[in-house]
Image (cartoon, rainbow, N blue to C red):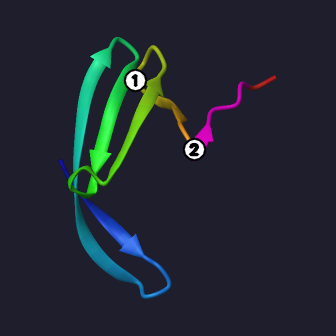
Amino acid sequence: MRAAWLRFPAVMLESLDQIYERVSESRYRYESGGGSFAAMLETNAVGFVTQYPGLWQLEEAG
């Protein structure tokens, strides 16, 4: 999949090729930068990402 990456502070728009591989019902392996970056993403029952290791995770309302 190709996405757009907006770089700051230069405000330059760049193309970013991404790969998503489903490894289980709720987990996807994400890769970008030709393999220079990879992460295992966790999703909920409707497919929204709930955990992006090292960057953020969903907090339950309460």
- The tag earlier along the polypeptide, 1 or 2, is 1
Question: Whole-percent x and y of residue 50?
Answer: 54, 29
Q: Position of residue 10 (x, y in %)?
A: 43, 88
Q: Residues within 10 Å of mark 2 (few under 14, many from 20)?
A: few
- State yes or no: discs 1 and 2 in contact (Cβ < 8 Å): no
Q: In this view, does 54 lie to the left or right of 43?
A: right
Between residues 39 and 11, which one lies in front from this camera angle?
Answer: 39
Q: Report helix, strand or loop for mark 2.
A: loop
Quarter of the image where one finds residue 47: top left
Which sits in the foreground, 11 or 54?
A: 54
- Estimate the x, y position of residue 5 in percent, counting from the top left: 33, 66
- Placement of 54 over or under 5, stated as above or below: above
Look at discs 1 and 2 and give the one toward the viewer. Answer: 2
Residue picked out by circle 2: 54
Marks 1/2: CA distance? 20 Å
4, 24: nearer the viewer = 24
Q: Quadrant of residue 23?
A: top left
Tell me what residue is drawn at x 57 percent, y 44 percent. Answer: 54
Left or right of 48? Residue 21 is left
Residue lying furthest right in this view?
Answer: 62
- In the image, residue 13 sits, relative to residue 21, either above or below, namely below
Position of residue 25 in the picture relative to residue 49 (left or right): left
Give the number of the disc on residue 47. Answer: 1
Q: Residue shown at 54%/38% (left/top)?
A: 53
What segment carries the magenta color?
55-60
Disc 2 marks a residue whose amino acid type is Gly
The amino acid at mark 1 is: Gly
Could you tell me which residue is drawn at 61 percent across and 35 percent down?
57
Q: Where is residue 44 in the image (x, y as percent from the top left)?
A: 48, 19
User: What count of labels does the image hold?
Assistant: 2
Characterize the magenta stretch by its predominant secondary structure.
loop
